[in-house]
Image (spheres, helix red, strand yellow):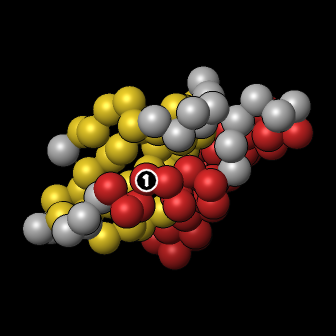
Amino acid sequence: MNRFTRLVGLSLASLSCLAMVVPASAQGRRDGQGEARRELRAGNVQTLRQIENRVLPQMRGMDYLGMDEFVANTYRLKFIKDGRVVFVDVDARTGRIINVMK
């Protein structure tokens, strides 16, 4: 087997390993979105837009990067301030800030 054939074989093996890993990580994100949709349809939580309208004015001096995740009826919003990422957990039912992680 020449060097080129070995290189192609290793590349294909690496790609097939990546293909097995990517769906698992993507699945986790879809589950959070699905959970948010189910809870929203059931009327148990506020929309992301409602949460943003309530929380963003309270986060003066920070740039909003978007929603990071939704888990257990909690929105995790992502901000940046002075080059540091700040996560803000918000109760999806009430819109109350639960935790700020710097």
Residue sitting farthest toward the bottom: 4
Q: Which residue is mark 1?
A: 55
Toward which corner of the image does residue 43 lie, by quadrant? top right
Q: Is residue 34 left or right of residue 41?
A: left
Identify the residue shown where x is 69% and y is 50%. Answer: 47
Asked if residue 36 can be seen in this view, the reply is yes
Task: Describe the element under mark 1 as helix, strand or loop.
Answer: helix
* Horizontal and vertical percent position of residue 38: 84, 35
The quarter of the image holding the N terminus is bottom right
- What is the tally of numbered marks visible in this picture? 1
Q: Is residue 87 above or below residue 31?
A: below
The foreground one among 85 and 7 is 85
Q: Is residue 77 left or right of residue 43?
A: left
The quarter of the image holding the C terminus is top left
Q: Is residue 51 left or right of residue 44?
A: left
Q: Is residue 6 left or right of residue 29?
A: left
Residue sitting farthest toward the left: 82
Q: Amino acid at mark 1?
A: Val
* Horizontal and vertical percent position of residue 93: 63, 32
Identify the residue shown where x is 68% and y is 43%. Answer: 46
The foreground one among 62 and 102 is 62
Asked if residue 38 can be seen in this view, the reply is no
Q: Is residue 50 above or below residue 29?
A: below
* Horizontal and vertical percent position of residue 39: 78, 32
Q: Is residue 74 above or below residue 82?
A: above
* Horizontal and vertical percent position of residue 59: 29, 58
Toward which corner of the image does residue 78 lie, by quadrant? bottom left
The foreground one among 18 and 35 is 35
Identify the residue shown where x is 48% and y is 62%. Answer: 66
Identify the residue shown where x is 24% and y is 56%. Answer: 85
Toward which corner of the image does residue 58 lie, by quadrant? bottom left
Q: Is residue 2 above or below residue 88?
A: below
